[in-house]
Each structure stands twice: as C-alpha cells, then as structure tokens.
Image (cartoon, helix red, strand yellow):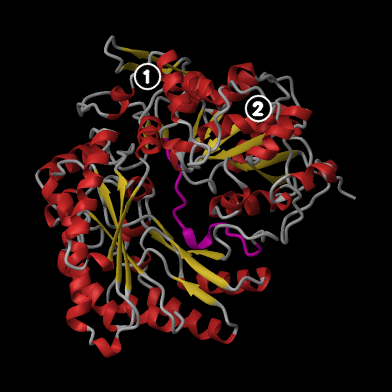
Amino acid sequence: MRKLALSDEILMSIEKPARYIGGEYNSVMKDKEQVDVRFCMCFPDVYEIGMSHLGIQILYDMFNRREDTWCERVYSPWPDLHKVMKEQHIPLFALESQDPLKEFDFLGITLQYEMCYTNILQVLDLAEIPIWSKDRKKGDPIVIAGGPCSYNPEPIADFFDIFYIGEGETVYGDLIELYKIYKHSDMTREEFLIKVSQIPGLYVPALYDVTYHEDGTIASFGPKYEGVPKTILKQVVTDMSSAVYPEKPVVSYMKVTQDRVVLEIMRGCIRGCRFCQAGMIYRPTRPKDVNVLKHYAEAMLDNTGQEEITFSSLSSSDYQSLPELTDCLIEKMDNNHVNISLPSLRIDAFSLDVMQKIQDIKKNSLTFAPEAGTQRLRNVINKGLTKENILNGSLQAFLGGWNKVKLYFMMGLPTETYDDITGIADLSEEISELYFANIPKEKRDGRVMVSASASYFVPKPFTPFQWAPMITPEEFQKRAYFVKDKFREAKNHKSLKFAYHEADITILEGLLARGDRKLCQVIYDVYQSGQIFDAWTEYFDKSNWDNALEKNHIDIGFYTYRDRCVDEILPWDFIDIGVTRKFMEKEWERAQAEVVTPNCRMKCSGCGAAKFGGGVCFENKN
C-alpha cells in the first residue's frame, strides 16, 4: 500500500490537503521496479490551476502508454506547505507514488506564464535538485521545459538542462531512448546533452555562448561546439486527427479551475492578430477530423463522469465542421444533462444560434474581444473585426435574450492615442444604447450591463510587435484613470463598468517575456528573498524585484520601454518557428501603416509556416 509523503498532522494543518495526496480518478499507477524511466510532469503553480492544463494531460497519457516509462505529476506547494517542507526538510514528491522528485529520471516543467518563474526555483529547491543546471551531476534528474514561454528560454536558461521547442507529441520518444543508453552506460552528462542537441527541437542552453555589445544588446549567439545546431526548429504535429489524446483524463476529487472535459478541436489560428504570440507560434492551423472529435467527446465523458465539455482552440468559430460537431453533441449530451461550453467564438448569427440551444433559460454574459477602441487601432493590430461586426453581434445577443456583455481591450498598443482609448468608453456606450433602443421595456429582464476590462499590453517574442516598446506603468495608470472618467461621464453610466489590470505585475511580465540570460541571476535573487507565486496579487511583492534588479545592475527600461531596431539580434532569434523574420518585419511595417493582412483562408500571406507540410496552407491544394 502506498505511503503518503505527508503525515496526517501536516495534512490536517494545511489548506486543501487534497492537493497533495494523489489517487485521483484515472491517475496511473505502475510498479516502479518494472519501468526503466520515471518522468514527472510539473505545472509550477497551485494544483487547481495545474490540473486544468490540457498539455500535461496529453503528455501524461502519451508517456504512460509506454511500458518502459511511468509518468507522474507534481504542482507547486501552496505557501503554507512550502513553509512546513522547508522547516522539516521534507523533499518535494510526486502525487502518484509519493516518491521524492530527486529519485526521478526527468522533471518536465511546463512554462505557461512568465510570472511563474520563481515557482520553478521553488520546485527545484524543495525537490533538493540543484537549482543551477551546471551543478547537476549524473544521477540527478534531467530538467526539461516546454510550453509557450520556452519560445524565449533565455531568462531561465541557466536553470534547465533542455528546452523542448514545439509540440510534445513528436520527439520525446527519441529523447527517452537516448536517455536509456546514457543511464546504463558510462556516458557523462555533458556527452548525453551534446547528443540530445542533435534531436530536432531540443535546445541545450549550456552548449551555447552569448556575448554583448557595450549598450547591452546581443553581439553574438551561437554553439560552443562543432555539430551543435545553430538554430532550433520547432516541432509540429502535422496530422492532429491521429495524434495522441487522452480518453481517460485525470479527474480531481476537489474543484479545480477548469472542472470539465476539454476537447481540443484544432491547433493554430488563421487570423494573424499582430499582438498574439499563440497565433504565430502554433501556425499552421490544423483541425481535427470531426468524427475523431465525436469519438473523443463520448469516450472522455463516459470515462470521467464530468457534466460539462468545452472546446479548446484559439478561435473555435474558424473550425469548419463546428456546426456538425455542435449539433451532434447537443443531440447526444442533452439526454445526459451534459453542458457544452463554447469559448473563443466570434459572435455571429451561427454562434448565437448555437448558444441559444446550449444555454439555460437564465443566459450568461456574452464576451467580445475588440482589443482596441477604434477601427484605426484594430487595423494596426490586424484584429479583423469591424465596429459593425461588434454592434451587430451585440444587437443580435440582446434580441436573443442576453442582457450582459463583456468587452476585452488592451491599452498601450503600438501607435495608440487618447482618441483610441476614448473609443473604449464610446463603444461600450454605443452597445448599451443598442439595448435601450431595440428592447422594449416590457421585454427587459433586469438591467443591461456592459463590462469592459483593459489589460496592459505586453509585446511578446515571435510577433510583429516584438520590436515595440511598452508604455510605462505610470502612463498605463494615467490612461486607465482617463478611461474610467469617460465611463463615469457616459449617459448610461449605471449600465457600464470598467476595470483594468495590475500594472506592477504586468511590467515584470514584459521584462521576462523579452529578457536574456542576464535575468537568470535576478530571478534567483528574487526567489532567495522569499518570493513565490508572483502571479497571485496577495503574494506579489514588487520590492523584491526592485532590489534584485538594482543588485544586478539591470535597467528594466532597457527590456521594456526601449524601441528595438529590426536588425538587432533578439534573444530568441536562434529558434525557427516556421514563420519567418522577414514576414514579421513586413507585418510590423504594415501595422505602422494601418494596413490589414487577410486571414489565412482568404489569402496566403507567405508567412513561412507552409514548410511544415500540413494544415490550412494545403486545404485548397489537390
């Protein structure tokens, strides 16, 4: 019988002990003596968020299909348990076996959000694995990272042995086979890592050198040894329909953030929004066959007992078989009292018709993401959404019985003016006016509410805006107050609401998003000051970051507020995502000229993603 790593006394003294005991429905148990490789997947945030992450569920299922491998899971201990583990010298453990992580062969950490970086060090520290990769010896776990933040691995490069660039379903098998040779031979860790670098998509930071100009920009970046590749090509699953996918996802016994079955309907996005990193790094758009999706939906619901299913994609409306899929699921699920959730929809007649069918009599709010307050700025960011689209969608929603609309905007976008942010209030007011003008008093079910929120724009690597400066936190705050005043002045102000994001956390996200290796020491010093869970407002302490930046002579403005020249070497330039730098430069120019680029189905823009040989790039070819 499995022995828990934490005593009853400890479990009774901490918040939500179910986070740490494992044994969830569909979790995989194996005999550790019968496997050759033990892999632990880590999400460096609290259990409830990590358990909602689809990527870990996919890789967990993929690894555990192998007879030679047992994959387990671990999440960041909440601060209450962190304190106990430090005081009592309890090593961090995996949920399934409750064995210490330091006994594993691999620790795989998914990188979803820059503000989780201190939690990566928390996991390594509590696991008693050397934090710096240079200090690890043979017998220590191989620490590997993947996920969207690995597309700029440099700010955390010194903590990882390997970064997996791209989609995890492709070359992990090659890595495991190579590891088994290393494990049972006298091959050194460095020799192993050099061989790892020959596997496409795997980046070993210790094998590369970087030099800097006097002004702090990168002078050179390249491999230390002959044969180590100069560029890393991202890994892409070209046939999504046959790709591995879990029919029995792990189900928690406690409530988690996304407490439902997740059906991934496609990867990629045809839209080409210039601010959106996911839209670039997941190109080309690759849909799954609708019959495959019907099978997975039925199997996952049968195997989990969940009462809700949601579609996962960057833009569900662009999945061409969506009408067939939703009609099929509505027919099947309605009899079983299963709810269907459809995020990432463009609000049009079809979407509203579907939502009429799947939502209860009491309708929830509808969400639009105009991103910018004026058409001029929506053209700059290539949103592909007109004011007419937004107003018509809102009107159709009101006529369909909805009376709550949520609007998402960004502030600080390139070329943004005060006229553009005034447009946030003006557009919100116009939407509320539509309700009063078109819905008779006797048909109004409660007060109409238009809720707008504005996030602080962060330029991300591998987007046309990767060269753009951020506005300062002070300027963001000033613009937010300005818009809030405009909302108060509106005629229908009682039906309008405006909120905005935390500036202090976001500016650090901007620092880490486009940073280089000089930030590794900064992150380490922040963690040593006691900082974890930066993404959580109640635990975030900006002074720890200010002190670490000052100690290491790092000017935050160099990474955030500075205009970059298009010929500057960027920290992530050694990664090839298929989408070419030439295309990014062209899109940056088109943005400044306020020119819209058609979506991928309207016209191919020659971004370069066709090199992968699949998806939307070949839909209309014989």
In the image as oriented, which residue stretches furthest toward the right? Answer: 1
Q: Tell me what residue is drawn at x 21 percent, y 25 percent.
A: 567
Q: Is residue 227 visible?
A: no
For label 2, the residue is 125
Residue 213: image x %, image y %?
Answer: 29, 11
Q: Is residue 130 above or below residue 622?
A: above
Tell whether 22 sits left or right of 176: right
Circle 1: residue type:
Phe
Within-10-Å neighbours for mark 1: few <14, some 14–19, many 20+: some
Q: Is residue 387 above or below residue 436?
A: above
Residue 314: image x %, image y %?
Answer: 38, 58
Q: Tell me what residue is drawn at x 9 percent, y 44 percent.
A: 593
1 or 2: tag closer to the N-terminus: 2
For label 1, the residue is 221
Tell whether 215 sits left or right of 486: right
Q: 454 or 233: which is nearer to us?
A: 454
Residue 129: image x %, image y %?
Answer: 68, 26
Q: 84 or 489: which is nearer to us?
A: 489
- Residue bounds of the magenta highlight: 233-248
Q: Is residue 445 above or below residue 26?
A: below
Q: Are marks 1 and 2 in contact (CB under 8 Å)?
A: no
Circle 2: residue type:
Asp
Q: Tell me what residue is drawn at x 31 percent, y 15 percent.
A: 216
